[in-house]
């Protein structure tokens, strides 16, 4: 497991999304590794976040192309959690499963091809630097580049039983600012327009849009408002999140949100909506299930699969019409906590599977 030393090297470099220097240093290490395999690097420079990196192999024209997708940022600032340890079964550290571990899986699988004397072609790699904060910058680049590809494998962590991921909920984050009118709560109560009261009605209306049977949830995660107990609240605001499994539910809830914002439950109130969909839904499709069956045939093993409530950049690529599967990384848990870990044996199985799939794709230029 020599590749675990490579994992250790990048894990011990802090690559918190806002630590541009650290993220870029990790990227430069991957540049060297991929370029040694024959990839050409295109760097998309950014000023306040790390640079995004696109690694391209040789292309056979008019043949399908495969994109391998990962991210090099992690969630903890410098000094919080940046060490690598291991025991007999597990490796521990920031990104060992989310998702420097996945990046190492795809790197090692590609290395195995070159060891066999195979020339890598029609397989490219995109590493972005801001996935952990919502891909607010990189999602536009990812969507633009995705249209060049026919297939995409995303190297986020595998499921507990090494499941691949065929579907992920869409997610949107929204903000409502409510403006009322202040007044003395004792002497001039009726002169005020209570923004807090308006917020309470809107909160209940928004949460009522939840439909658990269809996988749709609306969560009002934060509210603020008012000045003090003796003043009618002149302003209030809330932050809420929408998650959904099917596009029809997205359309339904977005329409209802607009109506709730426009309606004033309290006289004299005005409300403003901002925010929107961050990553659209990745729906399990006939094409993704067909690809899954082909993967089982190539690897001669049964592949479990699942849908997840969490999002990844797989949502973005899938929304562009690319046949996309996620969860090709190692199995791990505790991601986004100080106890993040990844199972050593899952690296072995995931590298073997990816290597078999890459070899098949290179020899056949298709799945």
Image (cartoon, rainbow, N blue to C red):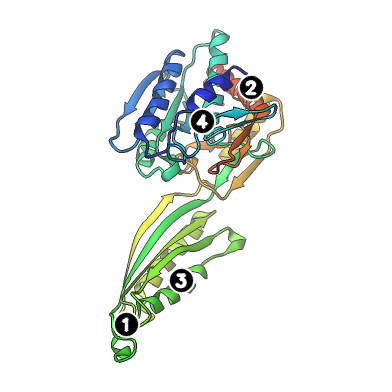
Q: Residues within 10 Å of mark 4 (few under 14, many from 20)?
A: many
Q: Which residue is mark 4?
A: 100
Mark closer to the observer (3, 2): 3
Task: Kindly report the distance in space between the C-alpha atoms of the residues bearing marks 2 and 4.
Answer: 18 Å
Task: Kindly report the distance in space between the C-alpha atoms of the residues bearing marks 3 and 1.
Answer: 17 Å
Whether pointer 2 and pointer 4 mark residues with C-beta atoms closer than 8 Å, the reply is: no
Rendered location of residue 296, percent (x, y) = 67, 30
- Mark found first going from the N terminus, 3 or 2: 3
- Mark found first going from the N terminus, 2 or 4: 4
Q: Quadrant of residue 116?
A: top right
Indicate which disc residue 352 carries.
2
Q: Secondary structure at mark 2?
A: helix
Q: Which residue is mark 3?
A: 203
Rendered location of residue 87, percent (x, y) = 67, 28
Task: Kindly report the distance in space between the C-alpha atoms of the residues bearing marks 2 and 1.
Answer: 65 Å
Residue lying at the far top of the rendered structure: 117
- Mark found first going from the N terminus, 1 or 4: 4
Whether pointer 3 and pointer 1 mark residues with C-beta atoms closer than 8 Å, the reply is: no
Q: Nearer the viewer, residue 82 or 150?
A: 82
Q: Residues within 10 Å of mark 1 (few under 14, many from 20)?
A: many
């Amino acid at each position: 497991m020599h590749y675990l030393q490579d994992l250790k090297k990048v894990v011990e470099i802090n690559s918190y999304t806002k630590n541009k220097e650290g993220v870029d240093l990790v990227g430069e290490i991957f540049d060297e590794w991929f370029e040694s395999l024959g990839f050409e690097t295109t760097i998309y420079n950014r000023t306040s976040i790390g640079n995004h990196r696109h690694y391209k192999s040789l292309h056979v024209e008019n043949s399908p192309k495969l994109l391998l997708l990962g991210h090099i940022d992690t969630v903890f600032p410098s000094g919080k959690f940046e060490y690598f340890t291991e025991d007999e079964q597990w490796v521990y550290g920031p990104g060992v499963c989310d998702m420097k571990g996945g990046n190492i899986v795809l790197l090692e699988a590609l290395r195995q091809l070159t060891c066999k004397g195979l020339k890598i072609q029609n397989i490219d790699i995109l590493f972005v630097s801001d996935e952990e904060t919502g891909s607010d910058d990189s999602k536009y680049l990812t969507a633009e580049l995705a249209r060049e590809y026919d297939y995409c494998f995303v190297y986020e962590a595998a499921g507990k039983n090494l499941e691949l991921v065929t579907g992920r909920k869409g997610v949107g984050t929204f903000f409502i600012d409510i403006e009322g009118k202040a007044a003395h709560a004792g002497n001039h109560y009726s002169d005020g327009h209570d923004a807090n009261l308006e917020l309470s009605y809107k909160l209940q209306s928004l949460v009522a849009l939840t439909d658990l049977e269809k996988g749709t949830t609306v969560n009002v995660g934060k509210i603020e408002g008012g000045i003090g107990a003796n003043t009618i609240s002149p302003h209030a605001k809330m932050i809420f999140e929408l998650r959904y499994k099917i596009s029809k539910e997205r359309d339904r809830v977005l329409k209802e949100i607009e109506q709730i914002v426009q309606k004033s439950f309290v006289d004299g109130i005005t409300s403003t909506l901002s925010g929107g969909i961050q990553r659209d839904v990745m729906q399990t499709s006939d094409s993704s299930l067909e690809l899954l069956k082909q993967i089982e045939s190539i690897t001669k093993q049964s592949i479990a699969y699942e849908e997840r409530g969490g999002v990844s950049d797989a949502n973005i690529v899938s929304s562009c019409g690319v046949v996309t599967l996620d969860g090709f990384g190692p199995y791990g848990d505790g991601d986004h906590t100080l106890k993040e870990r990844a199972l050593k044996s899952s690296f072995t199985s995931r590298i073997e599977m990816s290597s078999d799939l890459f070899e098949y794709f290179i020899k056949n230029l298709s799945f």
